[in-house]
Amino acid sequence: MYDHQFVKNFRKVYGFQARKASKELGVHEVTIHKYLKKGDAPKPIKILLDIKARGYLPDTGGWKDCYIDSQTFELVTPWYTVSPGHLCFYPRYKWSADQNKRLYDNLKKETQSQQEFMQTLNDQLVKLVGDIARRTGTND
């Protein structure tokens, strides 16, 4: 049975370089051409090609649909691409996001406290103006 994924992985890793593939996979170059012609190879070869095509990432869990691009060395996910530099700064980004959330939450609490204070002050002023109006007889 022709295995399209095997051929796709082979082309992704080696392109049309059968000589390079034969050296890395430990088989003769003629054997590589046979594998490609019938679209199948022994399971260890297929597993190794799958690992190399995915950029040495696991093929389970959250990593299942991800791979490392062999040309740009970027982590490619179904949603976005991450460069090594961005990946190195991820802890800093996360720390920064946590700090900004903490500052936002503190500001929100302060604003709520100020709004409650202003509402209380407003209620007291309205009551005071009402008392003065009643005592002076000007109920307008």
Image (spheres, rainbow, N blue to C red):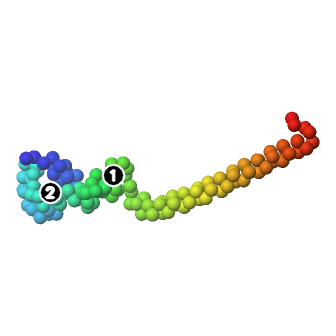
Residue 11, horizontal then vertical, whole percent? 19, 51
The residue wearing badge 2 is 46
Q: Is residue 55 visible?
A: no
Tag 1: amino acid: Thr
Quadrant into which the C terminus falls: top right
Q: State the residue lying farthest toward the top.
A: 140
Q: State the residue lying farthest toward the right.
A: 136
Q: Residue at point 10% right, 46% down?
A: 2
Query: How would you rate the neighbour count of disc 1 (Cα within 10 Å): few for under 14, some for 14-19, many for 20 or more?
Result: some
The residue wearing badge 1 is 77
Seen from the viewer's position, the closer of residues 100 and 132 is 132
Tag 2: amino acid: Lys
Mark closer to the chain start, 2 or 1:
2
Q: Is residue 70 left or right of residue 106?
A: left
Seen from the viewer's position, the closer of residues 100 and 18 is 100
Q: Residue at point 13% right, 59% down?
A: 45
Q: Is residue 112 visible?
A: yes
Residue 99, horizontal then vertical, whole percent? 54, 61
Residue 20, horizontal then vertical, whole percent? 17, 60
Q: CA distance from mark 2 to mark 1?
A: 22 Å
Find numbered disc 1 in the image and state the secondary structure of the residue it sits on: loop
Q: Residue at point 42% right, 58% down?
A: 86
Q: Residue at point 67% right, 55% down?
A: 113
Q: Is residue 60 left or right of residue 88?
A: left
Seen from the viewer's position, the closer of residues 118 and 67 is 118
Find numbered disc 2 in the image and state the secondary structure of the residue it sits on: helix
